[in-house]
Image (cartoon, rainbow, N blue to C red):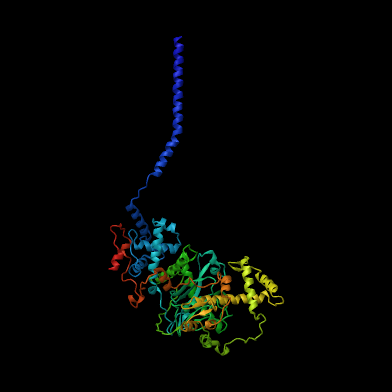
Amino acid sequence: MDMKRRKLLLLVMVQQILFTNLVLLYLLIRRRPRMVARRHRATLNTPVTYNMTQRINAQFCHLNMIIDAGDVQCLLNLRMNRNAFGRLCYLLMHIGGLTDSRYVRVQEKVAMFLSVLAHHKKNRVTSHDYMRSGQTVSAHFHEVMRALLKLYTLLLVKPTPVDETCDSEPWKWFEGCLGALDGTHIGVHVRARDKAKYRTRKGTIAVNVLGVCDRNMNFIYTLTGWEGSAADARVLRDALTRDDAFKVPRGCYYLCDNGYANVDGFLTPYRRVRYHRDAWGNRASAPQDHKELFNWRHSQARNIIERLFGLLKKRWAILRSPSFFPLHVQNQIILACILLHNFIRNQIPDDPLEEYDEQVGSPIHDTHNEYISSLESSNEWVNWRDQITRRSFRVIMDSVATSGSGTARCNKPDKTRRSWSGREEDELIQSLKDITTKGWKSENGFKAGYLTLLENAMHTTLPGTNIRGNPHINSKIHVWKKTYSSLVTLLSKSGVGWNDTDNTIDATDETWESIVKHDPTMRAMRHKQWTHFNDWAEIFGNDRATGEQSKTFETALQQVLNLGEEVPHGDFLGENRTYIPFDGVDDSISETHTPTSKTNAGASSKS
């Protein structure tokens, strides 16, 4: 009996022990995830401490990997070799006023700036690559660009005309030529309400950039900021009439395409004659007369500006796609890329990005005191073009008529013209306002079918009228748009105002004579009443190019500085324009400094 009781008690004790262990195991299993989560939270809440010395060393190691790895890596990342990079830093410090900050040296600032332009890197990508904050990257980007724009008088090239000693094809046929000019579109981001003005004929949102270059593919003059819808000839006219005008000496000229007028200082090819390379085909399609020969040589020479635009966009990726900077900063970036292009062309004669380079002579520079300030056609200029054309085609000179003129046109009456009364114009203005408020106007202009709608509205308000949508209303709207654009351009001139009482242009006689001297087409606009100007602004104001954001290097620098600082001139380094007195890469580029031991280059430059 005792044995059975003992066995029973032992069994009960074993069961209790097993039950207790199972309960403890269960509680431990439930508690473990909570302990792990508590430890994880504690780890996250623990402040992370950085070693500033290690971080600075890592930043300098990244910069040295780009610069000290060799010229190949430096060219791929910064678009220039180590020698040119050192010279650029020297210029920016001693002329542009760029200095070291507390933790960022000049070399790193310039490297970040060039990296953004060369590869169109966003702010976050650059801050990750260089281990800097986004605010630091943005501040130093604008600091370097401000210093670079101060060098424009030094980096822009002064052209030299072709003289009789030049033996370079095809420039030897264009004696007195300074170079070539053309316009190109560069994509930008603008506000939604301004997209209509910046939309090009190809449908892209861009600015129209006027570029002028010499025979060595160096920029001479640049005007950027005009809306993409503006014509090339209009941008050139503005460049000639600005305060910081584009100057063409008398007796010299630039080559340009048929988008411009054949006037003094600007030589264009013959119209309705083969010109572009794809029109010539194979070697069997040789020039057949003196005009085709002139166009062929003109195309070969003027192609220098097309190659230049292609090389510029190939070198700087930020010009190949719109950036997200404000519009005025995007225009400054375009000018900065142009200055860097001239600097690289000067420092690296064998440009690795250029497919081929023409060998040109070294003509003698002549000093001119009189410049071309307007676009006026003249028979003397047309006859001069014919003379140099026949001179270069002596073989068939006798078979060409002396006048070189085409067949005379018969003066036929224009059936599309009609005289508009004041009431008809008022009714058309009111109809345009009505369809604009009803949503018939988009950013690309009026929607299809608006002419029929306007014609019906005119017939309703004016019974028995013979006004038709096409050509009458269409032609009238075209004239109004052109007139409104001319008035806006005129009012943007210095010293020109608007008289709201008489709806006329308000300007002094001296100011008006200066304007008419540069643009004779403005002569008849002074005393005429423009009663519909405010209505035109309401209808066409958002989709007409005005050039209010147009900038040259001088205006861009004034906007960036916003100070009365004196702009450094390029002739203080001597006539030979030798940039840097040292040879080779600056040794300070490859050194690693801490904030306490680095040399303050800015302080040394000021002393």
Q: Position of residue 201 (x, y in %)?
A: 57, 70
Badge count: 0
Q: Position of residue 510 (x, y in %)?
A: 46, 84
Outermost residue, right side: 464
**In percent of the image, x 63 and y 79: which residue is there?**
422
Residue 69's quadrant in the figure? bottom left
Q: Where residue 98 appears, x then y in whole percent?
A: 35, 66
- In the image, is residue 115 above or below residue 241? above
Name the side, left or right, on which 137 lies relative to 427.
left
- Which residue is most to the front? 501
Position of residue 443 relative to residue 160, above or below, is: above
The residue nearer to you, when weighing 494 against 256, is 494
Residue located 30% across and 67% down the image: 605
Q: Residue at x 33, y 50 (%)?
A: 51
Of 196 and 20, nearer the camera is: 196
Asked if one can make out residue 91 in the rendered structure from this viewpoint, the answer is yes
Comparing 339 with 349, the one in front is 339
Q: Position of residue 245 (x, y in %)?
A: 45, 78
Q: Is residue 534 left or right of residue 43?
A: right
Q: Is residue 64 left or right of residue 321?
A: left
Q: Quadrant of residue 558?
A: bottom left
Q: Quadrant of the C terminus?
A: bottom left
Q: Residue at x 52, y 73 (%)?
A: 546
Observer able to see residue 80 = no
**Which of 432 and 367 lies nearest the eye of the viewer?**
432
